[in-house]
Image (cartoon, rainbow, N blue to C red):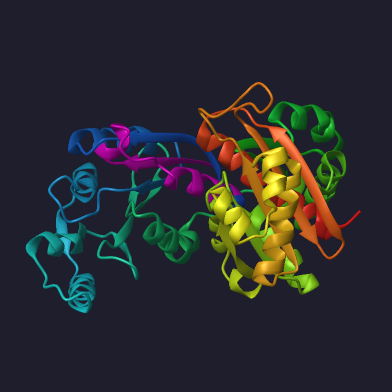
Amino acid sequence: MTCAIVSIGTEITRGELVDTNSQWLAERLLELGHDVVEMATVDDDEQRIGATLVRLSAQHRVLVCTGGLGPTTDDLTTRAVANVLGRPLVRDEASLHAIRERLLARGRTLSESNAKQADFPEGAAILPNRRGTAPGFAVTIDGVVGARAFFMPGVPLEMKEMFNEHVVPRLPEAQGIRRALRLRCFGLPEAEINDRLAGLEEKHGVTLGYRASFPEIEVKVLVAGAEERDTEARCRAAADEVIERLGKRVVYGEGDVTLAGAVGELLGQLGWRLALAESCTGGLVSQLITNVPGSSAYYVGGVCCYSNEVKVGVLGVGADTLGDHGAVSEAVARQMAEGACRTLGADVALSITGIAGPTGGSADKPVGLVHWAVHTPRGTTARHMVFPGTRHQVQRLAAFAGLATVRDQLVGP
């Protein structure tokens, strides 16, 4: 059984909006045992939407479509589907009531533009939207295959909730058992990861997939089988060997865990609190840490110490140290980390100082040079590297390298 994903919207075809829905849907469908073999993107044109649906419904059992269900004149998906089916649009009073109530809760009244969001092709199964004003719907498009087609809003939050609550229970039963396990990696290039895992697919009867999301690499272990216990066992065995070959310092987590989340989990286990002293990263590490729900339990705070005056006055970095070694140096990074722990009352501190570029480098200290240090109750560890890339890339690499070192020090030898 094959699936196709359709993204509808001129803002996508013009490059004004990045389509993240298709990526998420493909991963979820794969986890549910459905093969996504085609993705299509079409603009807000009624005829082209219809032609795309006709073509794909002749080849695939399942179509999952997003976009074009809004209240504006360029939201044409529902009408295009009705034309493909040869059915009239029918207003659903329950949906209309839900839309009216949602608008009233926002201090707005129902307009005819909003009311049209309660119109569906006759006979469609309606998919409620608890987050927005655009319900989805499901229909069967008769043809060579007889595709079951699902239509959801393009807003990611609304789409994901609708898919999990209303589409998943309506999906045709998958053939066979599928399992997928995602391993999050940092510290090795994609090519080297691929080389280290040579032969593993054949050994375990699995498929490996790689996805680069700068500066991380995700390794996905995919397994298909007829028996659930065997399929899960092969998936786990293959994943364990991936971790063994790459090393636990490279593979920092599974599934949706982030590097900052992995650090937070270790801090929680140890009962330690974290402080930050950031120069060239300008608060990026703090943002990564606070993106994790519950981080207030272990994150004390940070100092964005761009100037030498703040390094000296707030963190207690020695003026003589700055004079002898410069702001971008191991000695200063060490004193920044130790000062952050002392000033903010933390158990662990990460400091980062460097030259993000594109200017400011020299022969001795080129653009991309970053020093960072981690102070824990066990002592202070310092690292440095010359990172390639743009200013943004250098900052992001430095932030991740710093967090990786924190994790290493928390795990211990």
Does the image show residue 184?
no
Residue 163 in picture, x, y percent from top left: 44, 59
Residue 286 in picture, x, y percent from top left: 57, 58
Give the quadrant of the N terminus.
top right
Residue in the image at 30% along x and 42% along y: 8
Left or right of 256, for residue 409? right
In the picture as drawn, the residue positioned furthest to the right comes out as 413
| 8 magenta-colored | yes
| 17 magenta-colored | yes
In the picture as drawn, the residue positioned furthest to the left comes out as 112
Q: Nearer the viewer, residue 226 or 71?
A: 71
Q: How many numbered circles are shown?
A: 0
The relative height of residue 360 versus residue 165 in the rendered view (above or below) is above
Residue in the image at 42% along x and 39% along y: 145
Residue in the image at 26% along x and 61% along y: 134
Q: Nearer the viewer, residue 398 or 80?
A: 398
Q: Nearer the viewer, residue 238 or 402?
A: 402
Residue 332 in picture, x, y percent from top left: 71, 47
Residue in the image at 31% along x and 58% along y: 137
Left or right of 214, for residue 264? right
Does the image show residue 76?
yes
Q: Which residues are magenta?
A: 1-30
Residue 104 in picture, x, y percent from top left: 18, 77
Q: Nearer the viewer, residue 124 or 156?
A: 156
Q: Would you identify the image quadrant in which residue 195 lies?
A: top right
Left or right of 134, for residue 21? right
The relative height of residue 112 versus residue 197 in the rendered view (above or below) is below
